[in-house]
Image (cartoon, helix red, strand yellow):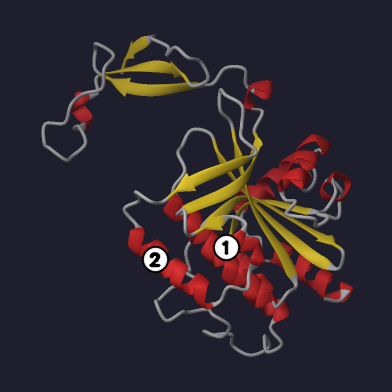
Amino acid sequence: MTTEISKRLLKRIREFNRKERYHLLTNAMGGEFSLNEDFASKLSKAIKQGDESPPTKNELASDATYVAMDYHLDWLAAAVQSICDPNSDKPIGERIGNTLDDGFQVLRGNQEDIDLLVVTKHKEKVWIILVEAKFDTGWSTKQLASKIRRLNWIVKMSQGAIVPRLVAAEWRDYEIEELREFSWEKSKDQKYFLEFEKEWKSENDQLWMSEIVDFPRKMIRLPSIPLDILKSHPSLLQPTRCKEDGKPPKSQTKGKKPDNSQYTHWKMVNKNASTQGSNEKNK
């Protein structure tokens, strides 16, 4: 890939960013997002596969690296295809894997996004790093597989122009493993993964994906970096609705959530402590 195409792709990814919160924050903070050296160092180590040389912490922390939040995968697919497809001056329609035989679409017209997008040029290729963060919610193997599958087709659209990476960033009250494993063996979405596996076996040309998807073991493996939330927020509280005794109400109808009127009180829950707050207030 030529340096000119690299520049055009970086520019096009910027042009597709229509996230209001991103532009609000860059205006409020007086400039575009950038990675600090500590985070960039952790990210550089996490994205290394085999003997390859990934972007260094200095490259990732430089002004030449583009950093965005809540970036839509539709925008990423459109940016890559519009630059790397030689026929992009014509209506793109369903060309280059936009729609597969099983109905899977790369461009979906929805808001599926990635928490943090990091894009940088390294050795004549554009590295696209997707960082998915978790703190208060759990991981969904179906959600991860959807993003990996879409990213796989975006890579194919690029015709070798990009190097993709997917990284987990999370906070826990125990030491973060460098590699997180997520099993879909007992998932309710087995059919979805069988379709994914069939597609992978028929076109096993994406080595990057073989590093993170283990079909025989029914596992997704992601490199993981820690989120140091307590450094800036020593205490994190959550208001939790309950009954007068501090317990959650029981549903009067099996299979349905409790009625809103059953929640008469609320209490504070300390999200980063082993004990929960017990302060209760009337609504």
Q: Secondary structure at mark 2?
A: helix
Residue 225, horizontal then vertical, whole percent: 66, 38
* Residue sitting at x 42%, y 16%: 268
Residue 219, horizontal then vertical, whole percent: 49, 51
Identify the amino acid type marked 2.
Leu
**Which residue position holds label 1?**
73
Q: Nearer the viewer, mark 1 or mark 2?
A: 2
Residue 21, horizontal then vertical, whole percent: 62, 48
* Residue sitting at x 72%, y 41%: 28
Badges 1 and 2: C-beta atoms under 8 Å apart?
Answer: no
Compute the Cα span from label 1 to label 2. 23 Å
**Which residue position holds label 2?**
194
Q: Residue furthest left?
A: 253
In the depicted view, which residue is nearer to us: 161 or 114? 161
55 left or right of 206? right
> Is residue 180 at least partly visible in the picture?
yes
Quarter of the image where the N terminus is located: bottom right
Quarter-wise, where is residue 18 in the image? bottom right
